[in-house]
Every structure is written in C-alpha cells, then in structure tokens.
C-alpha cells in the first residue's frame, strides 16, 4: 500500500499501521517489494519465488543472514544511501507461469546449483536462526556474497556541452476566469516557479521531493505537454523549444523522450512489441521492412530481451520486461534527453537494479542525458550526477549528488534523508517534520516555512531565502548560514 509514496508519507503511514496493529492486537499480512518497509512493519517474512515460498523466518534473520540464495540476491540488489555504486542485479529471470522447470525453480540463476538441485523440488528444511528454507545447501549461502559488488555509475565531465537549459521556468494549472480577470483577483502562487536547470550531455540530474512537489509537472513542461507560464526551455544548441508539443518540429520531438512510471499506461496492449518499436523507427528514420525489423531486434538486444519478444504483446510480459520495452521505445527515437518519471517504483529490487544498470549502459554508449524523478532517494543517489531537491515547486537545494547527500543539507533535504527506510530491522526512520498536506505554496518567504523543524524566525515567513553557495555548484536556499546548518547536522557547535 505504500508503493509510489514519498519517504515521509510512507514512514508516517507505516508508523500508523504499527501503532494500530499493536493497540488493537491486529494481525497483518503485508505484501511489498520494499525490504525497508518489511524491516519496519513485519515480525516474520515469507520470501516467494516463482509461486513458491522459498524462505520463511523472523524478519531480523531473513534480512541479516538469509538462508536462501534468492533472498541473498535480493538484498544485494538494493541501493544503499551511502553507496555510490549501482546495486547488482540477479542474472536471468524467474520461470513464467506454466514454463517447464526441473527441480529447484531458482537453479538456473543460482551460483550454488548442483545436479541434486535439478533432480527434484527441494523440500522446506531448517536453515538456522528459526528460518525454514527451500534450499538444499543453507550452510553454503554465505559463499555467494563474494561477487556481489555493483558497477560504478558512468559520470559526466563537468565541461560536457549543454543538452538542455531551463531558465526561470514557472508553471501554473490555475486558469483565471473572465470575472477574476475583470476583478483583478489575486492569483495563487505558481505551482512550479523559478526553475533553473542546466543539463549536460551524458549527465543524469535527479529530481526528488515529496508527492505534489512538482516533479512530474517539470518533466511535462520539458516534454511540451504543459506549456510554462514564464521562462524559457532551450536545447543544447541554443534553439528555444516551443512550449507546446504541437509546435515542435519532428527533430525536436525526437530529441526528448519520456518514460512513465507504469508501462501499462504507455504501451498499447493491442500492439505487439514489434509494432510498438516500429512507430518511432518509421516516423523518425523512415525505416521499413528488413531494416526496421533488424533495428527493432538490435534495440531489444540492447535492453536484454532479444528477437523472441518481437511478437509478444504487453499482456504477455512481466512488469520489468514491459519497462524494458518502454526504455527500448524511448531509445528507438535516438534521443539526446530522456525524462524518467518514477520508472522503477513498481518493480522488485532485482528488476529495478537491472533497469538502472541498463540506463547506465545506455548513458555511457550514447551520451544520453537523463532527468530522473524518483521518491526513492537511494535510487537517485546511485544513478545521478547532480540532484535537485524540490519543495512546493521550488528548488531548495541543488548540487553534486555526494554534496546534496552529505553535509550541509537544506533542512528539508535532512527531513527526507532522515525518513529513508533501510532493510535493517534495528534502524528506525526519524520523522523530523509533520506530514501536513499543503495545498499551495506560501505567497511569500520560504516555501518550507509551515513545516520546517528548525525555522529561524519571522524572516522565514516574509523573505525569500538567499541562495547560499557551498562550493562545487552546491546551492542551499535557507536563511540559516551554512556553518550553522553543518553544525546542526553533525551536532557540533557552529564556528564563531
Ligand atoms: N492537472 C492538474 N490540475 C491542477 N493541479 C494539478 C494538476 N496536476 C498536478 N497538479 C498539482 O500540481 C502539484 C504538483 O503535481 P505533480 O504531479 O507535478 O507532483 P509530483 O511531484 O510529480 O508528485 P508525485 O510524487 O505524487 O508524482 C500538486 O499540488 C498537484 O496537486
Ligand atoms: S536448492 Fe540448489 S539451486 Fe536451489 S537455491 Fe538451493 S543451492 Fe540454489
Ligand atoms: S529559510 Fe527558514 S523555514 Fe526555510 S528552510 Fe531555512 S530555516 Fe526553514
Ligand atoms: Mg509525479
């Protein structure tokens, strides 16, 4: 139930569920891809693979020392906050429903598999620390950890040419009626305002912020689906992009592609994968017949699906496979900029790791620039060169990922980072700001003024905070000086 929610809302809902369950002695069955959520709410865990329970046990044992190779692989697929490396995806895929299997369903992907594993489905046996495992060799699971190191994300040179520039972009949803205009009624503040972003070729900029902070709105404006009320969006060669998609030339449309959270919403269920990929190949490159098919196969190879998938329809694909088709379709256009809106939030951690790996490879091969929107701060940390933190449609912190996730941080960034869940049953998120729904940004002062846990006075309500430069392009918009912000985060006294 918390998939797709931002970290603070998710943490508040989980605390509520825990309190309710305790107070009412209520039993809960909680289904999730997110092992951080499982760590927070569950006493015991069952891990399923290919329709069978493969591991069962107390949460602490399953997350600390799982007695099954699949669970070990899942844990290695999770990006961690303090880690710059991309997590390692499990190789291969689970057998589909009705696909023939011999013995252990996990054997084709298991580094420990032997002939005995393939002879018959293993029974559930004791795996230590009160766990029951469907594995013949629970004592050998530790051997797998050695090769779990992930790959480093491809960085982008600081002097790389510009791919896209947003200057002072402001976006509104409200449309004043005639009477409002005649009365000159005051309009509410713009939903998104003053967005300056300079995206370099081959760079990934992560966009984070709670639900309603304006992430999708900014992506839609770049894609031409929502014309800005003010400001300018310019391509790297200096050409201003027409605000509305209808006014953009085919070449401008080709250069910017968008991938959505749910591939079901963007892939036509009646078209085969071949037809889905044929559209951009025909439209932008005039390919037909053999050349078109060859390019479609090449694209499917790039996303590690291959020719056997050409004739399948979306309904015959898993969630991860559908998202790969969506990635292949975006890349069929040969884009320079790819806008990703929550593209991994519906995927399990291993498929998510595979999709992140894929984007990283495509970025290196084609110098593609990405704007990557996600609620998951660990995923953004793993993939992004620079990160923008949005609150109520205003950028409150921007800079290299290592700086934004380090110290000093904007008070709102700290609230988000404190709320991140980890797959550690002994780690509790710290909820340092109320979860208050804000309908519109305040008319004056700091956008975060109503919820800020360290608000420094009336000035926060009246004056827009200054942009404080912390070096290396790291900017924090807050009335609190940087050394004081640093001291609050490290618990030290501020330098005089
Ligand atoms: N079509 C619309 N009409 C009016 N307001 C809208 C519309 N779409 C979005 N909004 C408002 O604009 C603000 C920003 O929405 P947006 O979808 O960009 O947020 P988001 O950061 O992508 O959130 P989420 O993480 O939930 O996807 C929200 O307050 C939302 O209610
Ligand atoms: S039974 Fe064999 S193949 Fe299956 S998980 Fe255990 S070691 Fe791997
Ligand atoms: S300017 Fe004031 S309200 Fe805004 S983040 Fe800083 S201290 Fe908090
Ligand atoms: Mg959104």
Image: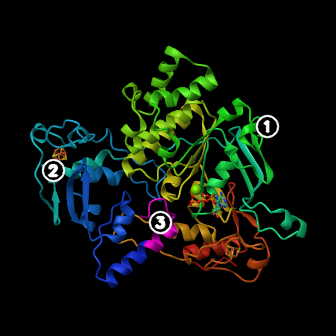
Q: Earlier in the sequence, mark 1 or mark 2?
A: 2
Q: Residue at x 55, y 30 (%)?
A: 332
Point 69% across, 40% down: residue: 159
The residue beneath circle 2 is 135
Q: Secondary structure at mark 1?
A: loop
Q: Which image quadrant shows ligand 1?
A: bottom right
In this image, 279 relative to 305: left or right?
Answer: right
Residue drawn at x 77%, y 60% is 175
Which residues make up the magenta segment? 1-13
Query: Split into 4 quadrants, where in the image is the C terminus?
Result: bottom right
Nearer to us in this view, 386 or 146: 386
- Is disc 1 surrounded by few (<14), some (14 to 19) or many (20+) residues within 10 Å? few
Which residue matches tag 3?
420
In this view, the residue in front, 384 or 209, is 209
Marks 1/2 in contact by CB < 8 Å: the verdict is no
Q: Is residue 213 left or right of residue 292?
A: right
Q: Residue at x 50, y 63 (%)?
A: 5
């Amino acid at each position: 139930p918390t998939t797709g929610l931002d970290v603070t809302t998710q943490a508040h809902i989980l605390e509520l569920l825990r309190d309710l369950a305790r107070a009412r002695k209520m039993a809960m069955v909680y289904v999730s891809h997110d092992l951080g959520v499982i760590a927070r709410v569950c006493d015991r865990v069952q891990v399923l693979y290919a329709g069978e329970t493969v591991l069962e046990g107390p949460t602490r044992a399953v997350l600390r020392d799982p007695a099954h190779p699949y669970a070990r692989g899942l844990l290695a697929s999770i990006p961690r906050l303090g880690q710059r490396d991309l997590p390692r995806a499990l190789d291969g895929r689970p057998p589909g429903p009705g696909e023939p299997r011999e013995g252990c369903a996990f054997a084709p992907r298991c580094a420990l598999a032997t002939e005995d594993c393939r002879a018959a489905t293993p029974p559930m046996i004791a795996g230590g620390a009160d766990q029951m495992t469907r594995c013949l060799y629970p004592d050998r699971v530790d051997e797998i950890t050695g090769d779990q190191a992930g790959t480093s994300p491809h960085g982008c040179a600081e002097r790389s040419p510009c791919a896209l520039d947003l200057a002072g972009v402001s976006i509104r949803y409200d449309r004043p009626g005639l009477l409002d205009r005649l009365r000159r009624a005051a309009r509410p503040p713009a939903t998104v305002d003053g967005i300056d972003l300079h995206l370099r070729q081959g760079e990934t900029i992560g966009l984070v912020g709670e639900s309603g902070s304006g992430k999708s709105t900014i992506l839609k404006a770049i894609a031409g689906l929502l014309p800005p009320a003010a400001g300018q969006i310019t391509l790297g060669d200096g050409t201003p992009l027409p605000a509305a998609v209808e006014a953009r030339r085919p070449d401008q449309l080709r250069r910017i592609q968008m991938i959505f959270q749910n591939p079901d919403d963007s892939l036509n269920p009646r078209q085969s994968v071949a037809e889905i990929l044929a559209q951009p190949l025909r439209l932008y490159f005039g390919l037909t017949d053999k050349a078109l098919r060859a390019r479609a196969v090449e694209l499917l190879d790039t996303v590690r699906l291959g020719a056997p998938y050409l004739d399948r329809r979306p309904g015959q694909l898993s969630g991860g496979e559908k998202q790969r088709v969506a990635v292949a379709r975006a890349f069929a256009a040969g884009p320079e900029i790819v806008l990703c809106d929550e593209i991994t939030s519906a995927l399990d951690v291993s498929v998510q790791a595979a999709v992140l790996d894929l984007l990283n490879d495509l970025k290196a091969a084609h110098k593609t620039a990405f704007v990557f929107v996600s609620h998951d701060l660990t995923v953004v940390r793993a993939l992004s060169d620079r990160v923008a933190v949005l609150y109520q449609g205003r950028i409150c912190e921007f800079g290299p990922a290592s700086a934004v996730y380090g110290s000093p941080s904007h008070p709102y960034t700290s609230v988000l980072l404190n709320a991140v869940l980890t797959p550690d049953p002994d780690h509790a998120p710290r909820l340092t700001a109320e979860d208050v729904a804000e309908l519109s940004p305040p008319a004056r002062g700091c956008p975060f003024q109503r919820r800020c846990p360290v608000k420094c006075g009336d000035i926060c309500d009246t004056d827009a905070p200054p942009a404080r430069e912390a070096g290396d392009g790291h900017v924090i918009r807050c009335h609190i000086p940087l050394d004081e912000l640093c001291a609050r985060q490290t618990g030290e006294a501020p330098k005089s």
